[in-house]
Image (spheres, coloured by chain):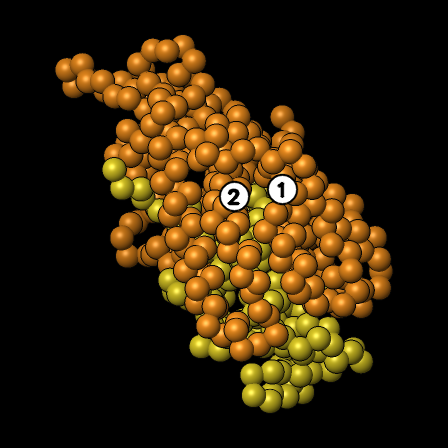
Protein backbone atom coordinates (compact mmCIF):
# COMPACT_ATOMS: atom_id res chain seq x y z
CA UNK A 1 0.00 0.00 0.00
CA UNK A 2 1.08 3.51 -0.62
CA UNK A 3 2.14 5.48 2.41
CA UNK A 4 -1.03 7.47 2.46
CA UNK A 5 -2.15 6.45 5.89
CA UNK A 6 -0.50 7.74 8.95
CA UNK A 7 -2.29 5.19 11.00
CA UNK A 8 -1.03 1.76 11.83
CA UNK A 9 -0.65 -0.23 8.68
CA UNK A 10 -3.27 -2.82 7.99
CA UNK A 11 -1.08 -5.88 7.92
CA UNK A 12 -3.56 -8.57 8.77
CA UNK A 13 -5.99 -8.25 5.97
CA UNK A 14 -7.10 -11.65 4.80
CA UNK A 15 -10.61 -10.84 3.71
CA UNK A 16 -12.04 -9.13 0.64
CA UNK A 17 -15.43 -7.81 -0.41
CA UNK A 18 -16.09 -8.73 -4.02
CA UNK A 19 -18.77 -8.23 -6.63
CA UNK A 20 -18.34 -11.04 -9.14
CA UNK A 21 -20.05 -12.08 -12.34
CA UNK A 22 -22.38 -14.98 -11.64
CA UNK A 23 -20.68 -17.00 -14.37
CA UNK A 24 -17.38 -16.74 -12.49
CA UNK A 25 -18.71 -18.59 -9.49
CA UNK A 26 -21.04 -21.11 -11.07
CA UNK A 27 -20.70 -24.32 -9.19
CA UNK A 28 -22.56 -26.90 -11.25
CA UNK A 29 -20.58 -26.98 -14.45
CA UNK A 30 -17.19 -28.09 -13.31
CA UNK A 31 -15.60 -30.10 -10.61
CA UNK A 32 -12.65 -27.80 -10.32
CA UNK A 33 -12.37 -24.30 -8.90
CA UNK A 34 -11.53 -20.90 -10.34
CA UNK A 35 -8.03 -19.53 -9.81
CA UNK A 36 -6.83 -16.02 -9.21
CA UNK A 37 -3.65 -15.71 -11.26
CA UNK A 38 -1.13 -13.05 -12.07
CA UNK A 39 -0.67 -12.19 -15.68
CA UNK A 40 1.19 -9.51 -17.56
CA UNK A 41 -0.96 -6.42 -17.83
CA UNK A 42 -0.96 -5.49 -21.53
CA UNK A 43 -0.96 -1.78 -20.78
CA UNK A 44 1.52 -1.53 -17.94
CA UNK A 45 3.62 -4.61 -18.75
CA UNK A 46 3.55 -5.41 -15.05
CA UNK A 47 1.71 -7.99 -12.97
CA UNK A 48 -2.00 -7.63 -12.50
CA UNK A 49 -4.52 -9.94 -10.96
CA UNK A 50 -6.96 -11.86 -13.12
CA UNK A 51 -9.17 -14.84 -12.60
CA UNK A 52 -9.55 -17.97 -14.70
CA UNK A 53 -12.83 -19.76 -14.23
CA UNK A 54 -12.99 -23.46 -13.48
CA UNK A 55 -11.28 -25.33 -16.29
CA UNK A 56 -9.80 -22.08 -17.63
CA UNK A 57 -12.90 -21.64 -19.77
CA UNK A 58 -13.30 -17.94 -19.18
CA UNK A 59 -11.02 -15.08 -18.21
CA UNK A 60 -12.01 -12.44 -15.68
CA UNK A 61 -10.51 -9.13 -14.73
CA UNK A 62 -10.14 -8.08 -11.10
CA UNK A 63 -10.40 -4.39 -10.38
CA UNK A 64 -10.56 -2.51 -7.12
CA UNK A 65 -12.78 0.37 -6.22
CA UNK A 66 -11.13 2.12 -3.37
CA UNK A 67 -11.53 5.36 -1.52
CA UNK A 68 -9.51 6.55 1.39
CA UNK A 69 -10.94 6.13 4.84
CA UNK A 70 -13.45 3.42 4.31
CA UNK A 71 -14.16 0.18 6.11
CA UNK A 72 -16.80 -2.51 5.91
CA UNK A 73 -19.28 -3.98 8.31
CA UNK A 74 -19.88 -7.52 7.15
CA UNK A 75 -22.53 -9.20 9.25
CA UNK A 76 -21.31 -8.89 12.81
CA UNK A 77 -17.71 -8.13 11.92
CA UNK A 78 -15.61 -5.15 11.02
CA UNK A 79 -13.35 -5.32 8.01
CA UNK A 80 -10.88 -2.53 8.01
CA UNK A 81 -10.00 -2.71 4.32
CA UNK A 82 -12.72 -0.73 2.55
CA UNK A 83 -11.92 -1.90 -0.95
CA UNK A 84 -14.59 -3.27 -3.23
CA UNK A 85 -13.33 -5.67 -5.86
CA UNK A 86 -15.07 -6.23 -9.17
CA UNK A 87 -14.62 -9.51 -11.02
CA UNK A 88 -15.85 -9.01 -14.58
CA UNK A 89 -15.55 -11.01 -17.78
CA UNK A 90 -12.53 -10.14 -19.85
CA UNK A 91 -11.60 -10.68 -23.48
CA UNK A 92 -8.48 -12.89 -23.41
CA UNK A 93 -7.32 -11.44 -26.73
CA UNK A 94 -6.17 -8.28 -24.93
CA UNK A 95 -3.70 -10.37 -22.96
CA UNK A 96 -2.66 -12.52 -25.92
CA UNK A 97 -2.09 -9.49 -28.13
CA UNK A 98 1.25 -8.31 -26.65
CA UNK A 99 2.75 -11.76 -27.21
CA UNK A 100 1.50 -11.82 -30.80
CA UNK A 101 2.93 -8.37 -31.43
CA UNK A 102 6.26 -9.39 -30.00
CA UNK A 103 6.54 -12.55 -32.07
CA UNK A 104 5.19 -10.69 -35.08
CA UNK A 105 8.36 -8.65 -35.19
CA UNK A 106 10.06 -11.69 -36.62
CA UNK A 107 7.49 -11.69 -39.40
CA UNK A 108 7.03 -15.44 -39.29
CA UNK A 109 3.96 -17.58 -38.89
CA UNK A 110 4.19 -19.41 -35.59
CA UNK A 111 2.12 -21.80 -33.51
CA UNK A 112 0.33 -19.79 -30.83
CA UNK A 113 1.28 -22.07 -28.00
CA UNK A 114 4.87 -21.13 -28.69
CA UNK A 115 4.00 -17.45 -28.86
CA UNK A 116 1.96 -17.14 -25.69
CA UNK A 117 4.67 -18.23 -23.32
CA UNK A 118 6.06 -16.18 -20.49
CA UNK A 119 8.61 -17.46 -18.01
CA UNK A 120 7.76 -14.67 -15.63
CA UNK A 121 4.05 -15.42 -15.78
CA UNK A 122 3.61 -19.18 -16.19
CA UNK A 123 -0.19 -18.90 -16.10
CA UNK A 124 -0.10 -17.09 -19.46
CA UNK A 125 -0.31 -20.32 -21.43
CA UNK A 126 -3.60 -21.08 -19.71
CA UNK A 127 -5.10 -18.17 -21.65
CA UNK A 128 -5.21 -20.37 -24.72
CA UNK A 129 -7.63 -22.72 -22.97
CA UNK A 130 -10.26 -20.00 -22.81
CA UNK A 131 -13.06 -20.81 -25.20
CA UNK A 132 -12.84 -17.47 -26.91
CA UNK A 133 -9.09 -17.35 -27.43
CA UNK A 134 -8.51 -19.64 -30.38
CA UNK A 135 -11.81 -18.86 -32.06
CA UNK A 136 -11.08 -15.14 -32.12
CA UNK A 137 -7.39 -15.11 -33.00
CA UNK A 138 -8.22 -14.04 -36.55
CA UNK A 139 -9.11 -10.62 -35.17
CA UNK A 140 -5.47 -9.93 -34.42
CA UNK A 141 -3.54 -12.30 -36.63
CA UNK A 142 -3.42 -13.95 -40.01
CA UNK A 143 -3.67 -17.70 -39.99
CA UNK A 144 -2.07 -20.46 -41.99
CA UNK A 145 -2.74 -24.15 -41.88
CA UNK A 146 -0.19 -26.74 -42.77
CA UNK A 147 -1.72 -30.14 -42.50
CA UNK A 148 -3.26 -30.28 -39.04
CA UNK A 149 -1.01 -27.57 -37.68
CA UNK A 150 -2.06 -23.96 -37.34
CA UNK A 151 0.25 -20.98 -37.50
CA UNK A 152 -0.42 -17.33 -36.85
CA UNK A 153 1.21 -14.01 -37.54
CA UNK A 154 0.29 -10.67 -36.00
CA UNK A 155 -1.61 -8.28 -38.22
CA UNK A 156 -1.83 -4.67 -37.15
CA UNK A 157 -4.47 -3.97 -39.75
CA UNK A 158 -6.75 -6.64 -38.35
CA UNK A 159 -6.00 -5.60 -34.80
CA UNK A 160 -6.91 -1.98 -35.46
CA UNK A 161 -10.17 -3.01 -37.11
CA UNK A 162 -10.93 -5.22 -34.15
CA UNK A 163 -10.14 -2.46 -31.69
CA UNK A 164 -12.28 -0.04 -33.66
CA UNK A 165 -15.22 -2.40 -33.23
CA UNK A 166 -14.44 -2.51 -29.52
CA UNK A 167 -14.51 1.27 -29.41
CA UNK A 168 -17.84 1.33 -31.24
CA UNK A 169 -19.35 -1.19 -28.83
CA UNK A 170 -18.14 0.86 -25.93
CA UNK A 171 -19.69 4.01 -27.33
CA UNK A 172 -23.02 2.23 -27.63
CA UNK A 173 -22.83 1.23 -23.97
CA UNK A 174 -21.87 4.75 -22.95
CA UNK A 175 -24.70 6.26 -24.90
CA UNK A 176 -27.13 3.77 -23.52
CA UNK A 177 -26.20 4.86 -20.05
CA UNK A 178 -26.35 8.46 -21.07
CA UNK A 179 -29.72 8.21 -22.76
CA UNK A 180 -31.30 6.55 -19.81
CA UNK A 181 -30.52 9.62 -17.75
CA UNK A 182 -31.44 12.11 -20.46
CA UNK A 183 -35.15 12.36 -19.73
CA UNK A 184 -34.87 12.97 -16.04
CA UNK A 185 -32.17 15.52 -16.58
CA UNK A 186 -34.14 18.22 -18.33
CA UNK A 187 -36.52 18.80 -15.49
CA UNK A 188 -33.83 19.29 -12.91
CA UNK A 189 -31.07 21.80 -12.51
CA UNK A 190 -28.87 20.37 -15.15
CA UNK A 191 -29.54 21.78 -18.60
CA UNK A 192 -27.40 20.59 -21.43
CA UNK A 193 -26.06 23.36 -23.59
CA UNK A 194 -26.97 22.63 -27.19
CA UNK A 195 -23.72 23.78 -28.75
CA UNK A 196 -21.89 21.04 -26.94
CA UNK A 197 -23.52 18.38 -29.04
CA UNK A 198 -21.19 19.09 -31.95
CA UNK A 199 -18.32 17.87 -29.92
CA UNK A 200 -20.28 15.15 -28.27
CA UNK A 201 -19.52 12.47 -30.83
CA UNK A 202 -15.85 13.15 -30.56
CA UNK A 203 -16.10 13.15 -26.80
CA UNK A 204 -17.65 9.71 -26.88
CA UNK A 205 -15.00 8.50 -29.28
CA UNK A 206 -12.18 9.82 -27.16
CA UNK A 207 -13.62 8.36 -23.99
CA UNK A 208 -14.12 4.98 -25.55
CA UNK A 209 -10.61 5.13 -26.93
CA UNK A 210 -9.36 5.96 -23.46
CA UNK A 211 -11.17 3.00 -21.95
CA UNK A 212 -9.85 0.57 -24.56
CA UNK A 213 -6.37 2.02 -24.13
CA UNK A 214 -6.35 0.61 -20.62
CA UNK A 215 -5.91 -2.78 -22.27
CA UNK A 216 -3.32 -2.06 -24.95
CA UNK A 217 0.19 -0.67 -25.14
CA UNK A 218 0.78 3.04 -25.47
CA UNK A 219 2.12 2.54 -28.96
CA UNK A 220 -0.97 0.68 -30.10
CA UNK A 221 -3.15 3.23 -28.37
CA UNK A 222 -1.60 5.96 -30.51
CA UNK A 223 -2.04 3.90 -33.66
CA UNK A 224 -5.67 3.37 -32.74
CA UNK A 225 -6.18 7.08 -32.25
CA UNK A 226 -4.92 7.64 -35.77
CA UNK A 227 -7.02 4.79 -37.09
CA UNK A 228 -10.10 6.38 -35.55
CA UNK A 229 -9.25 9.64 -37.28
CA UNK A 230 -8.68 11.46 -34.04
CA UNK A 231 -5.86 13.95 -33.86
CA UNK A 232 -3.64 13.78 -30.82
CA UNK A 233 -4.53 16.64 -28.58
CA UNK A 234 -1.73 19.09 -28.24
CA UNK A 235 -2.56 20.49 -24.89
CA UNK A 236 -1.89 17.96 -22.21
CA UNK A 237 -4.44 19.71 -20.08
CA UNK A 238 -7.28 19.25 -22.52
CA UNK A 239 -7.01 15.52 -22.70
CA UNK A 240 -4.38 13.12 -21.70
CA UNK A 241 -3.48 9.70 -22.91
CA UNK A 242 -4.46 7.04 -20.42
CA UNK A 243 -0.87 6.13 -19.77
CA UNK A 244 -0.25 9.52 -18.25
CA UNK A 245 -3.35 9.22 -16.21
CA UNK A 246 -1.93 6.17 -14.64
CA UNK A 247 1.32 7.79 -13.74
CA UNK A 248 -0.45 10.69 -12.22
CA UNK A 249 -2.71 8.67 -10.03
CA UNK A 250 0.25 6.81 -8.64
CA UNK A 251 0.20 9.54 -6.10
CA UNK A 252 -2.94 9.07 -4.14
CA UNK A 253 -4.91 12.10 -3.19
CA UNK A 254 -3.38 13.21 0.03
CA UNK A 255 -5.75 13.37 2.90
CA UNK A 256 -5.27 14.70 6.36
CA UNK A 257 -6.26 12.97 9.54
CA UNK A 258 -9.51 14.82 9.58
CA UNK A 259 -11.78 12.71 7.50
CA UNK A 260 -14.52 15.27 7.50
CA UNK A 261 -12.49 16.71 4.66
CA UNK A 262 -13.93 13.96 2.58
CA UNK A 263 -17.24 15.55 2.82
CA UNK A 264 -17.98 16.24 -0.80
CA UNK A 265 -17.97 20.02 -0.36
CA UNK A 266 -14.37 20.35 0.67
CA UNK A 267 -13.15 17.61 -1.49
CA UNK A 268 -14.71 18.91 -4.64
CA UNK A 269 -12.63 22.03 -4.40
CA UNK A 270 -9.58 19.95 -5.07
CA UNK A 271 -10.21 18.70 -8.56
CA UNK A 272 -7.78 16.27 -10.11
CA UNK A 273 -4.98 18.01 -11.86
CA UNK A 274 -5.82 16.69 -15.25
CA UNK A 275 -9.18 16.36 -16.86
CA UNK A 276 -10.35 15.07 -20.17
CA UNK A 277 -12.03 17.32 -22.68
CA UNK A 278 -15.50 16.18 -21.88
CA UNK A 279 -14.90 16.45 -18.18
CA UNK A 280 -13.77 19.99 -18.66
CA UNK A 281 -16.87 20.93 -20.54
CA UNK A 282 -18.96 19.31 -17.91
CA UNK A 283 -17.02 20.87 -15.14
CA UNK A 284 -18.18 24.22 -16.42
CA UNK A 285 -21.75 23.14 -16.17
CA UNK A 286 -22.11 21.92 -12.66
CA UNK A 287 -19.51 21.40 -10.06
CA UNK A 288 -21.51 21.11 -6.91
CA UNK A 289 -20.60 18.04 -4.97
CA UNK A 290 -19.09 16.29 -7.92
CA UNK A 291 -15.74 14.66 -8.29
CA UNK A 292 -14.45 12.61 -11.15
CA UNK A 293 -14.29 8.96 -10.37
CA UNK A 294 -10.69 8.73 -11.41
CA UNK A 295 -9.67 10.41 -8.20
CA UNK A 296 -10.95 7.46 -6.26
CA UNK A 297 -9.34 4.73 -8.22
CA UNK A 298 -5.76 4.66 -7.22
CA UNK A 299 -3.89 2.00 -9.07
CA UNK A 300 -2.24 -0.66 -7.04
CA UNK A 301 0.09 -1.72 -9.80
CA UNK A 302 3.22 -2.38 -7.89
CA UNK A 303 6.38 -3.49 -9.50
CA UNK A 304 6.80 -7.07 -8.61
CA UNK A 305 9.76 -8.24 -6.68
CA UNK A 306 11.62 -10.85 -8.51
CA UNK B 1 -35.95 2.58 -10.51
CA UNK B 2 -35.11 5.83 -8.86
CA UNK B 3 -31.59 5.72 -10.22
CA UNK B 4 -32.89 6.49 -13.67
CA UNK B 5 -33.62 10.02 -12.63
CA UNK B 6 -30.07 10.66 -11.73
CA UNK B 7 -28.30 13.80 -12.77
CA UNK B 8 -25.38 12.05 -14.20
CA UNK B 9 -23.09 12.88 -17.00
CA UNK B 10 -20.83 11.25 -19.45
CA UNK B 11 -17.62 12.15 -17.76
CA UNK B 12 -18.62 10.49 -14.57
CA UNK B 13 -19.98 7.42 -16.21
CA UNK B 14 -16.83 6.81 -18.13
CA UNK B 15 -14.45 7.51 -15.40
CA UNK B 16 -14.62 4.12 -13.95
CA UNK B 17 -10.90 3.83 -14.13
CA UNK B 18 -10.76 1.23 -11.48
CA UNK B 19 -7.27 0.18 -10.68
CA UNK B 20 -5.73 -3.06 -11.77
CA UNK B 21 -5.62 -4.69 -8.46
CA UNK B 22 -2.74 -6.74 -7.24
CA UNK B 23 -3.70 -9.18 -4.61
CA UNK B 24 -0.97 -8.90 -2.16
CA UNK B 25 -0.82 -8.13 1.46
CA UNK B 26 2.08 -6.58 3.22
CA UNK B 27 4.87 -8.72 4.44
CA UNK B 28 3.96 -11.57 2.17
CA UNK B 29 6.27 -12.42 -0.62
CA UNK B 30 4.36 -13.73 -3.48
CA UNK B 31 5.73 -14.54 -6.89
CA UNK B 32 3.96 -14.22 -10.18
CA UNK B 33 3.67 -17.96 -10.47
CA UNK B 34 1.58 -18.37 -7.35
CA UNK B 35 -2.07 -19.09 -7.72
CA UNK B 36 -4.92 -18.31 -5.34
CA UNK B 37 -7.65 -20.90 -5.60
CA UNK B 38 -11.23 -19.99 -4.86
CA UNK B 39 -13.00 -22.87 -3.13
CA UNK B 40 -16.46 -22.75 -4.61
CA UNK B 41 -17.82 -25.53 -2.43
CA UNK B 42 -17.86 -22.97 0.36
CA UNK B 43 -20.40 -20.89 -1.58
CA UNK B 44 -23.30 -23.16 -0.70
CA UNK B 45 -22.63 -22.84 3.00
CA UNK B 46 -22.08 -19.09 2.86
CA UNK B 47 -24.59 -17.06 4.76
CA UNK B 48 -26.32 -13.99 3.36
CA UNK B 49 -25.30 -11.05 5.51
CA UNK B 50 -25.99 -7.32 5.69
CA UNK B 51 -23.05 -5.32 4.36
CA UNK B 52 -22.27 -1.68 5.16
CA UNK B 53 -19.63 0.51 3.56
CA UNK B 54 -18.59 2.98 6.25
CA UNK B 55 -17.19 6.45 5.54
CA UNK B 56 -14.29 6.07 7.95
CA UNK B 57 -11.43 3.74 8.55
CA UNK B 58 -11.96 1.48 11.51
CA UNK B 59 -8.70 0.09 12.78
CA UNK B 60 -10.01 -3.32 13.54
CA UNK B 61 -10.60 -6.64 11.87
CA UNK B 62 -12.94 -8.95 13.67
CA UNK B 63 -16.11 -9.21 15.64
CA UNK B 64 -18.27 -6.21 16.48
CA UNK B 65 -21.82 -5.85 17.72
CA UNK B 66 -23.05 -4.30 14.52
CA UNK B 67 -26.72 -5.15 14.77
CA UNK B 68 -26.94 -4.20 18.42
CA UNK B 69 -25.25 -0.81 18.30
CA UNK B 70 -25.46 0.20 14.64
CA UNK B 71 -28.31 -1.40 12.76
CA UNK B 72 -30.69 -1.08 15.70
CA UNK B 73 -30.35 2.70 15.78
CA UNK B 74 -30.69 3.19 12.02
CA UNK B 75 -33.69 5.21 10.91
CA UNK B 76 -35.15 5.15 7.46
CA UNK B 77 -37.19 7.80 5.72
CA UNK B 78 -38.15 7.16 2.13
CA UNK B 79 -34.93 5.84 0.60
CA UNK B 80 -32.59 7.65 2.91
CA UNK B 81 -31.20 6.03 6.00
CA UNK B 82 -29.73 7.90 8.92
CA UNK B 83 -27.71 6.75 11.87
CA UNK B 84 -25.43 8.23 14.46
CA UNK B 85 -22.02 6.65 14.59
CA UNK B 86 -19.43 7.83 17.13
CA UNK B 87 -21.32 11.09 17.41
CA UNK B 88 -21.37 11.72 13.71
CA UNK B 89 -24.47 11.82 11.61
CA UNK B 90 -24.32 9.37 8.74
CA UNK B 91 -26.66 9.28 5.80
CA UNK B 92 -26.87 6.29 3.56
CA UNK B 93 -28.79 4.22 1.12
CA UNK B 94 -29.07 0.68 -0.01
CA UNK B 95 -27.87 -0.27 -3.49
CA UNK B 96 -28.16 -3.56 -5.31
CA UNK B 97 -25.42 -5.53 -6.98
CA UNK B 98 -25.64 -5.14 -10.75
CA UNK B 99 -27.79 -7.72 -12.49
CA UNK B 100 -25.90 -10.91 -13.16
CA UNK B 101 -23.47 -10.21 -10.35
CA UNK B 102 -23.18 -11.55 -6.84
CA UNK B 103 -21.62 -10.05 -3.76
CA UNK B 104 -19.10 -12.28 -2.05
CA UNK B 105 -16.91 -11.96 0.98
CA UNK B 106 -13.75 -13.99 0.52
CA UNK B 107 -11.42 -15.04 3.25
CA UNK B 108 -8.05 -16.66 3.05
CA UNK B 109 -7.91 -20.17 4.38
CA UNK B 110 -5.21 -20.59 6.95
CA UNK B 111 -2.32 -22.47 5.50
CA UNK B 112 -1.19 -23.93 8.81
CA UNK B 113 2.35 -22.91 8.27
CA UNK B 114 2.50 -24.56 4.91
CA UNK B 115 5.35 -23.19 2.87
CA UNK B 116 3.49 -23.66 -0.37
CA UNK B 117 3.29 -20.70 -2.67
CA UNK B 118 -0.31 -21.27 -3.58
CA UNK B 119 -3.07 -19.87 -1.45
CA UNK B 120 -6.71 -20.63 -1.00
CA UNK B 121 -9.68 -18.41 -0.36
CA UNK B 122 -13.21 -19.41 0.51
CA UNK B 123 -16.53 -17.65 0.38
CA UNK B 124 -17.61 -16.79 3.90
CA UNK B 125 -20.65 -14.64 3.17
CA UNK B 126 -22.75 -13.49 0.25
CA UNK B 127 -24.84 -10.37 -0.36
CA UNK B 128 -27.03 -9.02 -3.14
CA UNK B 129 -27.25 -5.48 -1.86
CA UNK B 130 -25.14 -3.22 0.27
CA UNK B 131 -25.68 -0.09 2.28
CA UNK B 132 -23.18 2.71 1.87
CA UNK B 133 -22.92 5.61 4.25
CA UNK B 134 -21.87 9.21 3.70
CA UNK B 135 -20.67 11.49 6.40
CA UNK B 136 -23.36 14.14 6.75
CA UNK B 137 -24.18 14.39 3.04
CA UNK B 138 -27.37 12.80 1.76
CA UNK B 139 -26.87 9.92 -0.65
CA UNK B 140 -27.22 10.75 -4.33
CA UNK B 141 -26.72 8.94 -7.59
CA UNK B 142 -23.50 10.93 -7.99
CA UNK B 143 -21.91 9.09 -5.12
CA UNK B 144 -18.85 7.27 -6.33
CA UNK B 145 -19.87 3.82 -5.18
CA UNK B 146 -23.16 4.17 -7.07
CA UNK B 147 -21.20 5.07 -10.19
CA UNK B 148 -18.80 2.21 -9.63
CA UNK B 149 -21.76 -0.14 -10.01
CA UNK B 150 -21.82 0.86 -13.69
CA UNK B 151 -18.44 -0.70 -14.25
CA UNK B 152 -19.68 -4.25 -14.98
CA UNK B 153 -21.93 -3.07 -17.80
CA UNK B 154 -19.17 -1.01 -19.31
CA UNK B 155 -16.77 -3.93 -18.97
CA UNK B 156 -19.23 -6.10 -20.88
CA UNK B 157 -19.01 -3.68 -23.79
CA UNK B 158 -15.22 -3.50 -23.68
CA UNK B 159 -14.79 -7.25 -23.42
CA UNK B 160 -17.75 -8.69 -25.28
CA UNK B 161 -17.21 -10.70 -28.45
CA UNK B 162 -16.78 -8.66 -31.59
CA UNK B 163 -18.59 -9.82 -34.70
CA UNK B 164 -16.65 -10.51 -37.86
Percent of width and height locating residue A67: 67, 57
Q: Is residue B46 visible?
A: no
Q: CA distance from mark 2 to mark 1?
A: 9 Å
Task: From the viewer's side, name the closer residue of A162 and A3.
Answer: A162
Q: Which chain is orange?
A: A
Q: Residues within 10 Å of mark 2 (few under 14, many from 20)?
A: many
Q: Which chain is yellow?
A: B
Task: Tell which subunit mark 1 falls on.
Answer: A
Task: From the viewer's side, name the closer residue of A69 and A8.
Answer: A69
The residue to which callout 1 is attached is A239
Percent of width and height locating residue A72: 63, 66
Helix, strand or loop for disc 2: helix
Q: Residue at x 75, y 80 (%)?
A: B89
Q: Which of the image's four quarters has the C terminus of chain A?
A: top right
Q: Residue A244 vs residue B150: left or right?
A: right
Q: Are marks 2 and 1 in contact (CB under 8 Å)?
A: yes
Q: Residue at x 74, y 54 (%)?
A: A271
Q: Residue A64 vs residue B27: left or right?
A: left
Amino acid sequence: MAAKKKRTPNTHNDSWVVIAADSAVETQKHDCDPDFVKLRNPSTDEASLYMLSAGDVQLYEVKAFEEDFHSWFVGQTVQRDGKLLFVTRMDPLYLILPYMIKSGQEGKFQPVDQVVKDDEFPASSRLLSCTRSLTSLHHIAEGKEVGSLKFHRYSQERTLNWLQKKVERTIVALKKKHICVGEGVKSTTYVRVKTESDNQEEDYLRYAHGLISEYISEELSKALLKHLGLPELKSAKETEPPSKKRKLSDKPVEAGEDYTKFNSGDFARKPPKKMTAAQKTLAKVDKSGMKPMSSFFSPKTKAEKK
Amino acid sequence: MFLVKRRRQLAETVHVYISCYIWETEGRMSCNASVTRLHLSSLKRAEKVPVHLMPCEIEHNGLAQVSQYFTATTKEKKKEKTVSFRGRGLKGQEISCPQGYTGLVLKEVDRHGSDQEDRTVKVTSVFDKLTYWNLETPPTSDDTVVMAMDWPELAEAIHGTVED
